[in-house]
Structure formats: C-alpha cells, structure tokens
Image (spheres, rainbow, N blue to C red):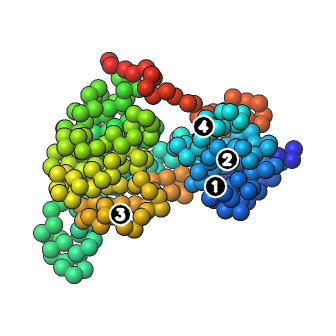
Amino acid sequence: MGYKVLLPQEIMKDGREYLKSRGWELVPGSGMETEHIIQDIKGMDAMVVRLSKITREVFEAADKLKVIVRHGAGFDTVDLQAAKEHNVQVLYCPVANSTSVAEAAMMYILYCSRNFTVVRRDFISDYYKAKLKTPKSEIAGKVLGLVGCGNIGSRVAKMALGFDMKVMAYDPYKARADFPEGVEVVRDLDVIFTKSDFVSLHCPTTKLTRQFVNKDKISLMKPTAFLINTSRGMVVNEKDLYEACRDRVIAGAGLDVLQQEPVDPENPILYLDNVVVGPHIGAATKEATDRASLHSAMGIVEVFEGKEPTWPVREIDWETAPVFTD
C-alpha cells in the first residue's frame, strides 16, 4: 500500500497493530509542537493528533494529507476551516474516553466534598485537625447539575445516581426522551447554577460557551456549592472563578482543565485551599488511551477504504443549531 501515518506522539499497541497489519508505515514525529509537525508532514497520508495544535500552516505544508484523527473527544486544537479548504477529513474519538472522564468528574466531586486539599495539606502536621476539624460532607442526597449531557455527561449522571445523588441536566441540543432515566431535564441554565450543590461542566468550547461561566453565573450558585470542570478551560472565566473561590462566594472548585496548559506556575488559582487542580488527566487512563488509539486507527482505514467514517467531526453553527424546548 505504501501509506504513511505521522505520529507526533506515540499511540498504543492495538492502534499500531491495526495499522501495521494493513500495510501502513508508522512514522514517529520529530516532536509534538506545531513547528515539528510542519517540518514532518510532507509525504504523510494521515496523522493521529494527541496534544499538538494543528494550524493552517500545517495544512499548507502538507502535500498528500488526506485525514487527521484527533486522539480524543475534543477537536478545538484543529483548524477545521483550513482542513476543509485543503480537503482533509478530520475525525475524532468521541466515545473512547467517555467513561474515564466521567470517573474523573466523580473523583473531583468526591475530593471537593471531603475538602481533601486541606485534609492532605494538614494531616501530617496536625492529624486531628485534618480528621475532626476540617469540614466534610457526603454527596448522597446532594444535587448534581450537569451542563451538557452527551457521551460524558450521561455517564456522569448514571454514576452520580448510583451514589444516591439527585441529578438535573441542561442540554438544549438533546430531546427530553434521550436523557438518562432518573435525570431531571432542565431547560433554563440558571436553574442548574441556582439549585445545584455541584455544577459539572460537559460542553465543548464554542462561540456560545467561551467563558460563559463568569461572575454572573457563579453568583447564582449556593455558597456551599462547588464547580467541577472536566471539559475545556476556556468555558470558564478563570479570573472570576478565582475571585469567587478566594472570597468564598462558592465553596470551591475541582478543575481538570485550565485555560493555559501546561499550567502557568504563577496562576493564583493553583494555590487556593478550596480548589483542586489536575493536569487534564480525565482521559489519561490506560483503557481510554488504548481505545482512542484503536479508534483513531480504525478511522484512518475507513477513509482510505472509501467507507463512511464512524466518527467524523461535523462543523456545527451553534448559534443557529436547533434547540429543544420540550
């Protein structure tokens, strides 16, 4: 066949074997930065992208590129307009990491409920303060409000119901009948922020969601409530969230994502004792990575075999997309 796939970062065994068994040549990249990819892209028929940013310059440097697969559920790091102009099919892996990210959301919920940033900080120096004098709470009976109820949000809902939480969800692009059983469907976003003990974000970065969690939305939350974000850093106004957590307008936050990644060590939100921050590890489990590698490989082969790909990225005009009010 002679097809070549560029791998700026490694993919896992199942994905590698799927491609190699079909005659593909796997070409390791010289690095994962955009400038490395521009240097490496000539002669490549396909590429699997993990963390790298794929700009217009990448497409302009390519001469054979037919398909790019985002090794995960998000695709905001790929210039979709440039891909379209250069006739490059963009795929992604929307279900590969759903369980792992959902579990991460539950982890942050539990971590916040037990005030674990403070517990972990204090328990060696003052064991009984950490054990007995640091406030903690159960999540059973608490209200979880989901903003977005797609592949990941739906899994979070089912997990939370298993913890005996009350779950409400806002997703204007989803029919009422398609929400998981046991979830209260809410069509007013402000209700999620007003009534929830935990607000968990599961939405992409779009024109409508960019920094939509701002001072106004946060001010609606209970002073005992936590914000959980395992989606994208850009959906939150980080300065507003920092000030709200610092001033105890809300109880705190569990953040798997920030606006700048890798993190800026000067970012003050990293040092608040009511905030837990992770290095975007929601999808970084062995199982999710294995699935994403395999699904990426399957997508590439589907395109080159002339089949309709299972997981194409579809451009959506979110401002005009139909919404449900049922």
Residues at marks 3 and 1, CA–CA distance in whole angstroms: 25 Å
Could you tell me which secondary element the residue under label 4 belongs to? helix
174 and 43: which is toward the camera: 43
171 and 160: which is toward the camera: 171
Q: Mark 2, mark 1: which one is toward the viewer? A: 2
- For image coordinates 72% across by 33% down, the residue present is 87
- For image coordinates 33% across by 39% down, the residue present is 212
Quadrant placement of the C terminus: top left
Task: Identify which amino acid the numbered label 2 is placed on.
Answer: Glu
**Residue 24 in view of the camera:** no
The residue sitting at the right extreme is 1
Vertical placement of residue 304 versus 53, above or below: above
Vertical placement of residue 315 versus 11, above or below: above
Query: Could you tell me if the residues under marks 2 and 1 are in contact, i.e. CB atoms within 8 Å?
Result: yes
- Residue 34, labelled with which disc? 1
- Residue 80, labelled with which disc? 4
Q: Position of residue 196 (x, y in %)?
A: 22, 41
Task: Identify which amino acid the numbered label 1 is placed on.
Answer: Thr
Write down the quadrant of residue 258 in the picture.
bottom left
- For image coordinates 45% across by 28% down, the residue present is 318
Q: Which residue is mark 2?
A: 57
Task: Identify which amino acid the numbered label 3 is placed on.
Answer: Asn
Residues at marks 2 and 1, CA–CA distance in whole angstroms: 9 Å
Could you tell me which secondary element the residue under label 2 belongs to? helix
The first of marks 4 and 2 along the sequence is: 2
Residues at marks 3 and 2, CA–CA distance in whole angstroms: 30 Å
- For image coordinates 19% across by 72% down, the residue present is 130
Query: Could you tell me if the residues under marks 3 and 1 are in contact, i.e. CB atoms within 8 Å?
Result: no
Vertical placement of residue 124 versus 202, above or below: below
Could you tell me which secondary element the residue under label 1 belongs to? helix
Residue 287 as seen in the image, left or right of residue 169:
right
